[in-house]
Image (spheres, rainbow, N blue to C red):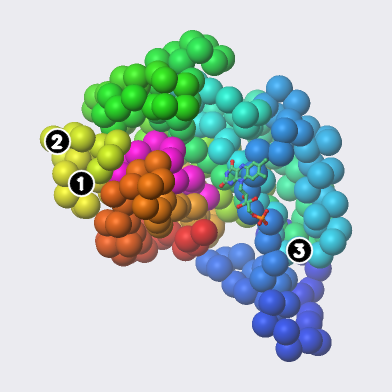
Amino acid sequence: MKDMPNIQTTTKDPLLQPLTIRGLTLKNRVMSTSHASGMDDENMPALRYQRYHEEKAKGGLALTMFGGSSNIAPDSPSVFRQLNVATDDIIPHFQAFSERIHQHGTALMCQITHMGRRGDAQAAEWLPTIAPSAVREDLHRNFPREMDQYDIDRVVKAFGQAARRCVEGGLDGLETLAGAHLIGQFFSPMTNLRGDGFGGSIENRTRFALMVHEEIRRQVGDDFVVGMRLTLDEGEGGEYPKLCVWGLAHAVFTGHLLNRSGYRIAN
Ligand SMILES: Cc1cc2nc3c(=O)[nH]c(=O)nc-3n(C[C@H](O)[C@H](O)[C@H](O)COP(=O)(O)O)c2cc1C
């Protein structure tokens, strides 16, 4: 992070100690997690969006993650006022945002995602939703279209381009969102019924996430902080009740990413 004030602490409180992740030093351990604040202007983080996060920065937190569920492609439409990182139009907003937040010695990261079957075919461009398999989504009752190799390749590239926009916007890092979104839909045996190299074994169900994170790393270079927000256990009786395999899937996944894509934060 450029032009940050010197980080000095006189307290021994562990929460207030600096933390270095890759090339980024955070002044303490207090952060705000990503959420779609509804303060966007046509899916862009303009002045009021930035000022909302600036108030947190003034309060002294080390890192603000913004842009909950920011969409990386047109077939992941905004359904709850997310940011649109699928266009270079967002870069000047990111640049102004970074400058504003860095003045307070606070770092900022964006969360990026493709919602997959959680999108809505009736929203925005009216594009069919996509998913690893055509398992109906009960939120809006759409049947998603099963992704072919072309879809997989273009979505991987779109993640990389969104990541490039985060770098060009002067951000300090990004995280992808797995959870119930497209990356998580590949992880879950409830939504991934594929018989090809992207379904079945844990390694196969992790392949898409790994391709996404490798492409992100190619686009952002070595120093940028990249993480993932994921759900480890959606619980008995939850939406995906058989997810007791999550712990193991996560271990394999994390190992792969640590070794191969320079993944640094699990949230
Ligand atoms: C309105 C709203 C929107 C949210 N959107 C997202 C989101 O897009 N992505 C995400 O990972 N978490 C999202 N969250 C979850 C928050 O990041 C956070 O985990 C949650 O509010 C619990 O943290 P807290 O106890 O500090 O409030 C959202 C939360 C709220 C209240």
- Element under disc 1: helix
* Quadrant assignment for the N terminus: bottom right
Task: Name the residue furthest front.
Answer: 237
Q: How many marks?
A: 3
User: What residue is at 65 percent from the left and 28 percent from the top?
Assistant: 81
* Tag 2 residue: 196
- Element under disc 2: loop
Q: Are marks 2 and 3 in contact (CB under 8 Å)?
A: no
Residue 12 at what x, y percent from top left? 73, 88
- Element under disc 3: loop
User: What residue is at 30 percent from the left and 27 percent from the top?
Assistant: 135
Residue 119 at what x, y percent from top left? 47, 25
Q: Is residue 39 above or below residue 221?
A: above
Q: Quadrant of residue 97?
A: top right
The yes-or-no answer for disc 2 within 8 Å of ligand 1 is no
Left or right placement of residue 69 versus residue 155 in this view: right
Q: Identify residue type, mark 2.
A: Asp
User: What residue is at 28 percent from the left and 24 percent from the top?
Assistant: 134
Q: Identify residue type, mark 3.
A: Leu
Badge 3: how crowded within 10 Å, few (<14), some, or many (20+)? Answer: many
* Tag 1 residue: 204
Real-space Cα separation, disc 3 to disc 1, in angstroms? 39 Å
Residue 96 at what x, y percent from top left? 77, 40
* Tag 3 residue: 61
